[in-house]
Image (spheres, rainbow, N blue to C red):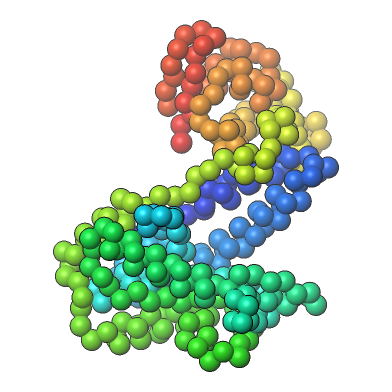
Amino acid sequence: MIVKAKQIPPVILKLQALSPRVPPHHNKHSFIKDDLARYLAGYKGEKSIEYYLSFLPDEEYYIFHDIRLFDGEHFFQMDTLILTKRLVCILEIKYLAGIIEFDRDFNQIIQIKNGQEKAYPDPITQLQRQKSQLNKWLKRNNLAQLPVQGFVVFSNPQTVIKSNDKSTKNIVIKSHTLHSKISDLQDQKKMDVLTQKEIKKIIRILMKYDTPLDHSIIEQYQLSRGDVLKGVICEVCNHLPLQRIHSYWYCSQCTYKSKDAHLAAVQDYQLLFGSVITSNQLKEFLEITCSSLATRILKSVSSSMEGENKGRVYTLSK
C-alpha cells in the first residue's frame, strides 16, 4: 500500500525554473545545469522502482517515498521506507550508469563511464547511518523497536556492479530483485512485532513528522535577484522575453501567441522567490508597465491579499 506517493522533489521544480533564467555566461550556469541533470537522474531512478514494489501485497506492506525526519540532532531523508508488522526496510536508490566498483577501504564507490572515473560517497555507509537514525527516531517517539533492515538499490538495468567484499552482495541489489529480497526478509522474521493498531500509529506519526526540505534555491547558489533573467518565456522555443501586445503574449522569434503564458512565469517567481508578491514586483518580473494588468493577474493567481493601494501584498496560490 502506497502511503506516501513519489512526487517531483521541490528542488527539481526550483532548478527547472532557475536554469533558463540564469544567463549562459554566468559562473553558476553550468553548476545549475549539472545539478538539475543529477537530480532528474535520481528522480528517474526512484520512480523506476515503483513497478517492482507494486508486486508486494498491499495488505502487508506500507510504502513511503521521500520521508525526512528529525532524530533529535539531525534531519535524515530516506528515498523509500517500507513498513510491515515484522520489520522496517530502508531503500537507498542509485541510478548511476556504467561500472560501479565498491571500495570499502576508503568508503567510496567509483563510477567508470566513457573511460572516465568519478568517486562518490559509499551508499552502504549512508544506509547504515540512516538505519541508526531511524532507530533513534523510533525510540525518541516512544514507538516499538522494529528490526531495521535496508538495501542499496541500483535501478539502472545496465549498471555493472563490482566488489571484492562478500558482504556487499547482501546489501547491494538490482531493482528487479526487490520483490524477492524484501519478501525473503519478511519470511525470515517468523513472528509479527506489531499489531494493526500499532502499525496505524506509526503511519500516523511518520506522516505527522515528515518534514520535506524546502529551502531557497537563490540562496543555495548565492545568487541575487539581479542574476535572474526576467520576463515571460515562450513555451514553444524558450525565447525570453515575450512581448505583451494587446491581450496576447507574442514571441518575436517563432511568432507564437498566448493568452496565459504569464502563468508559468508567475509559477517561476513563486519557486524562486516565494509566495508573497506585490504589484510592482510582478510588473518588474513580467516586464510589463500596466498596473491594471498586474492587478488582474494577481487577483487571478492569489489565494489572499492584505493592505491597500501601493502597500497591498498578495499571496500566490500553491
Looking at the picture, tell me which residue is in the foreground, 74 or 257.
74
Q: Which residue is pictured at 67% across the width and 40% down the height? A: 222
Residue 199: where, in percent of width, then height? 22, 65
Q: Which residue is pictured at 63% across the width and 78% down the height? A: 106
Residue 4: where, in percent of width, then height? 37, 58
Q: Looking at the rendering, which quadrant does residue 160 occupy?
A: bottom right
Above or below — where is 13 with respect to 172? above
Q: Is residue 203 left or right of residue 30?
A: left
Q: Which residue is pictured at 69% across the width and 75% down the height? A: 111
Looking at the picture, tell me which residue is in the foreground, 123 or 263.
123
Q: Give the quarter of the figure containing the N terminus.
A: bottom left
Above or below — where is 256 with respect to 65? above
Q: Is residue 268 left or right of residue 204?
A: right
Whether residue 295 is visible? yes
Looking at the picture, tell me which residue is in the foreground, 214 or 13.
214
Above or below — where is 175 with respect to 134? below
Residue 290: where, in percent of width, then height? 65, 13
Whether residue 48 is visible? no
Q: Looking at the rendering, which quadrant does residue 17 occupy?
A: top right
Q: Which residue is pictured at 38% across the width and 80% down the height? A: 182
Residue 249: where, in percent of width, then height? 69, 27
